[in-house]
Image (cartoon, rainbow, N blue to C red):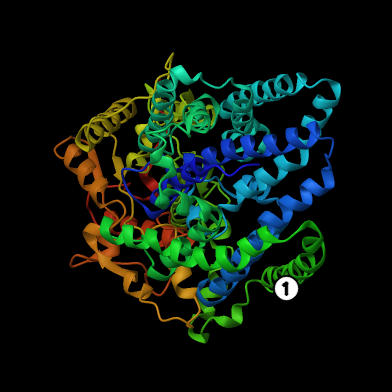
Amino acid sequence: MNYRADIDGLRAVAVVSLLLFHAGFERITGGFVGVDVFFVISGYLITKILTDACAQERFSYWRFLEKRFFRLYPALLATLALTLIGGFLLLSPEHFKLLGEYALSAQFSASNILFLHKAGYFSEGSGTNPLLHTWSLAVEQQFYLAWPILIYLAHRLRGAAVPVAVGVAGVASLLWSRHLINTAPDSAYFLVQSRVFEFAIGALVLWIPRVHKRFRAAEELLLLVGLAAILYAVLMFDKHTPFPGKMALIPCIGAALCLYAGQARFAGLLLRNPLATWIGAISYSVYLIHWPVFVLYRYYRFGPISDHEMMAMAMAMVPFLLAYPMYRFVESPMRRLSFRQMARSGAVVTAALSAVVVGASTFAYAANGLPWRVANDNAEALNDAKGFYESKFGGIGFPWESVLGDKSQEKVSVLLIGDSFAGHLTSGLDKVLRERHLKGISVWESGCLISPDYVTSRNGVADAACLKSGARALELLRTLDVPVIYAQSWGGGYQWMTMRKGGTSPIKFASNQEYHDFMARNVETLAGIAGHGRPFAVMGSPPGDGSRQGVDMKTCLQRPRYIPSDCQNYLMFKQDLGYTYAENTGIKAALRGVRGITFIDPYELFCKNGECHALLENKIPYADGFHLSIDGSKLVAEHFANQLLGGQSGIVALAPSSGFTERKQ
């Protein structure tokens, strides 16, 4: 196949979009579509290789796979080895153990399957996974297993059947992707079946007739339109865009237009200039190395890559400095090997390195992340933090509807409703009520707004679990004549909601103030349903542990000391840097003066003199960056229960003789 400089230029567009997105540039919210551009390029090139081989009657399935293996695998192994070394020096045992598992899955082209079951691409936990980006390599390698068979069989049937087979496969994949977006969005994102249409779009470019010389000006326009489509997706898409599905057609068709018209005389210089072609030539190595570099640096810094865009731009250059040696000494030599050399010396070197990486990955996983790397003074925190979120969340053991406190009591004394921020209070409230021989009821569901008029939506569809928990909470509000505690996340997570009845379009807010006013009105509505004269407490959200980008307090306490880090400085932080400071302040202001509603601010417990503490009484109060642990739940419930028992208005004047009963209808 003849070299086309414009294809390297298109690779540069893809990898730079990803770099800027992952470096944290606020304007590049859709840079993740760079992966889709790569898929389109691969579909074009791989199909070209296969159709040429079939036409010349030299098709060999195993030789094709062997070439792709030696093209991709050595650089991947080098990346895995370097990442494991970096992880050994920086990562906590918990995260280093996971890295071992991730490295094993990457070597066997199964990362997308593993991450589908572990966490979504945009989830908070993805910020501590240095190998998250290998999901796309797994998709590509799985594509290589099936695509040659389709092309070969279609060619044997009839040469003209090849584009038909490609088109049918692409349409089927697109329809399946659209279906999964509504039923299993993570599957739509990670699985090869829902990505085949992107490869097919690139492949179909091969059968589009070339523009006649007299109309070459059309190529200029087509290339500009293609680049504009990619740029639109990079700037306008974000993590809330339903993807891939039909929205992926925008960058994919844009990339296909660039492949078709990339040799345009004038506009083509945007892709064929020396800088673009150099970046494109090393784009695979840049892609491999950039994400581990960003994740490990964030981990070391205990925060985002940068606090301003100039530093982010500087960090975006680092992967190029590291990628070039890998391109020069690993990727390029393997490309230059003949097939016979590849089968001999290339296989020996690759097998040896693979054995080392597999062994190191297995050892890291089997040895629980090598906890001996952690200083002795952190051993207690390490033991307490093992499997922390799964086992220590303040709502663990309490399903969406639970009886709290002394279950032998006939009368209910308090009702707790909300989302996971109500859930994380259940352990503490249960303890407080048991000590006072009182009974309570909790109804909560993670990520669910409680409202008679609105409900949390997923991809524009009302969430079924939220409908169920919300209906039950409203029923108990109407029927139980007891004090109410309403706790939820007051952040922007509920800016994606729809009408409870007949709504399909998500509700948007023009400003934080408009959102806070909306939430305050919802609180007043719930208090009105409960009935005036009943204590109605609104619990603010705690400040969090000062962590950012998914690196939390437990991780700081567990990290090795090989490389000095100032992460423990973040265990005490300015009050206005708390995760929820702006939201709590806004909701509190919006509720000020509303009769019958008391706002309880956890900052009173966690923060003194403008400084917030991530540790309380030498206990870890958070299960993750902002949800309370069991210890934190008990500290919060005990602190505010005792304070309110002293005569201040609040949760409930807890006394056995309170005698709250169901309201008579």
Spot occupied by residue 29 in the image (x, y as percentages of width and height): 37, 41
The residue at which mark 1 appears reads as: 356
Spot occupied by residue 87 in the image (x, y as percentages of width and height): 55, 71
Residue at image x 79%, y 69%? 348
Q: Residue furthest front?
A: 214
Residue in the foreground of this view, choosing between 336 and 131: 336
Image quarter of the N terminus: top right
Spot occupied by residue 248 in the image (x, y as percentages of width and height): 51, 30
Q: Quadrant of residue 161?
A: top right
Residue at image x 56%, y 66%? 328
Does residue 112 show up?
yes
Q: Quadrant of residue 206?
A: top right
Please rate how many residues cluster around mark 1, counting C-alpha atoms within 10 Å: few if below 14, some from 14 to 19, many from 20. Answer: some
Q: In this image, 163 relative to 226: left or right? A: right
Q: Secondary structure at mark 1?
A: helix
In the displayed structure, would residue 611 be above or below residue 428?
Answer: below
Residue in the foreground of this view, choosing between 308 and 348: 348
Spot occupied by residue 463 in the image (x, y as percentages of width and height): 50, 28
Q: Residue furthest bottom?
A: 376
- Total residue callouts: 1
